[in-house]
């Protein structure tokens, strides 16, 4: 968003909190709090409630035509010239009805999320069929690494990873927390579910490692706060990251050449390509769920401390912005 022309008026529709965008977007924009999709229903870090997920998907599909028509009128009334989204399919249809281009930026979609379920569920099968049709209406798909083929998009361009490059603030962290110069620093990033399952007291008995987290965490994990510490800079200062295998944290470890320790999430479709990509990169190792929860993490940490991965191209945001500008074919919006 920050790389788009500053004379453009940006309107963001999302259920994400306002602080998230203000930390990341260094330009004016309007935020409308409105969910564009419903994520898979989870009650813990490892499993998906498929019955609830399919029920919600069925409800959204039943409402999609009416919602797309209403959204198309909003696009016209607000003189919107292009729609950019990730995996929610209905904005694509709204853009089509409004007569404007739509651009999808993704490494997977609902087609992959529901593909395995579609083999045994008529509801999932009908959802996949409907979503394939909606995705096929996109003007352009920008496919990042760590992705599925997604051949149902009629026009596709591969771009590099999208992620943030940080600057090391290691000295500041060591000084602020009164740590010795050779202390090992490890960021724990398990998302909104994982932290409650892990017992921090069994992670390691070593005193030369300090663990950090941007979520509230019990001792010995040190909690950091977004108003004082910048996530990309903290990540770039680490000796290793222990994280859930998700696109955001994986891409930023690869871009900043920080070794990553992750754990299996086989229930999640994207896990397959993320794990393959991390292994191919060479800077990541997988620990079992049992070790994640019960410890000790020492073997995985020692592997990470000895790893020397190369930084991966993270220029995807710039190229995506260029493609968005190009497809509008207008100097101003």
Image (cartoon, helix red, strand yellow):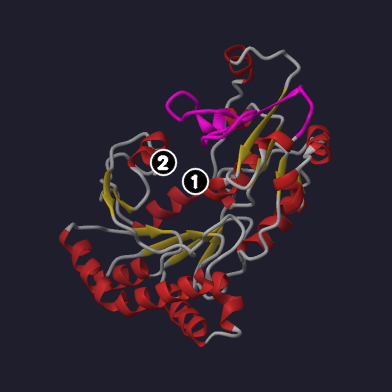
Q: Position of residue 258 (x, y in %)?
A: 69, 36
Task: Report if residue 219 lies within the magenta region.
Answer: yes
At 70% from the left and 47% from the top, the residue drawn is: 293
- 97 relative to 107, above or below: below
On screen, residue 90 versus residue 80, left or right, reads right
On screen, residue 272 versus residue 196, left or right, reads right
Q: Residue furthest bottom?
A: 122
Q: Position of residue 285 (x, y in %)?
A: 77, 47
At 19% from the left and 63% from the top, the residue drawn is: 74
Range of magenta residues? 204-233
Q: Crowding near pointer 2: few (<14 within 10 Å), some, many (20+)?
A: some
On the image, numbered disc 1 is attached to which residue?
317
Task: Report if residue 185 lies within the magenta region.
Answer: no
Secondary structure of residue under mark 1: helix
On screen, residue 317 versus residue 326, left or right, reads right
At 45% from the left and 30% from the top, the residue drawn is: 226
Q: Mark 1 vs mark 2: which is more N-terminal? A: 2
Q: Position of residue 295 (x, y in %)?
A: 76, 42
């Amino acid at each position: 968003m920050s790389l788009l022309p500053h004379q453009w008026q940006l309107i963001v529709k999302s259920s994400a909190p306002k602080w998230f965008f203000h930390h990341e977007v260094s330009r004016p924009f309007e935020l409308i709090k409105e969910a564009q999709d419903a994520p898979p229903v989870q009650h813990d870090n490892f499993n998906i409630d498929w019955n609830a997920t399919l029920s919600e998907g069925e409800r959204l599909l039943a409402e999609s035509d009416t919602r797309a028509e209403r959204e198309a009128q909003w696009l016209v009334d607000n003189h919107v010239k292009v729609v950019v989204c990730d995996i929610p399919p209905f904005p694509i249809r709204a853009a089509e009805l409004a007569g404007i281009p739509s651009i999808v930026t993704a490494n997977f979609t609902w087609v992959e999320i529901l593909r395995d379920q579609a083999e045994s569920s008529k509801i999932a099968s009908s959802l996949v069929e409907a979503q394939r049709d909606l995705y096929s209406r996109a003007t352009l798909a920008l496919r990042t690494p760590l992705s599925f083929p997604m051949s149902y998009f009629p026009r596709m361009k591969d771009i590099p990873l999208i992620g943030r490059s940080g600057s090391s603030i290691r000295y500041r962290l060591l000084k602020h927390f009164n740590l010795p110069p050779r202390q090992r620093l490890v960021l724990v990033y398990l998302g909104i579910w994982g932290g409650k399952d892990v017992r921090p007291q069994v992670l390691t008995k070593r005193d030369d490692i300090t663990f950090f987290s941007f979520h509230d965490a019990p001792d010995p994990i040190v909690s950091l706060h977004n108003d004082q510490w910048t996530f990309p800079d903290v990540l770039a200062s680490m000796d290793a990251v222990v994280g859930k295998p998700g696109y955001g944290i994986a891409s930023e470890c690869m871009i900043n050449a920080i070794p990553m320790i992750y754990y299996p999430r086989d229930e999640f479709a994207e896990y397959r390509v993320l794990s393959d990509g991390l292994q191919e990169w060479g800077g990541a190792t997988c620990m079992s769920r049992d070790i994640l929860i019960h410890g000790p993490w020492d073997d995985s940490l020692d592997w990470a401390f000895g790893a020397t991965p190369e930084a991966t191209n993270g220029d995807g945001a710039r190229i995506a912005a260029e493609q968005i500008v190009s497809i509008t074919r207008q100097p101003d919006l």
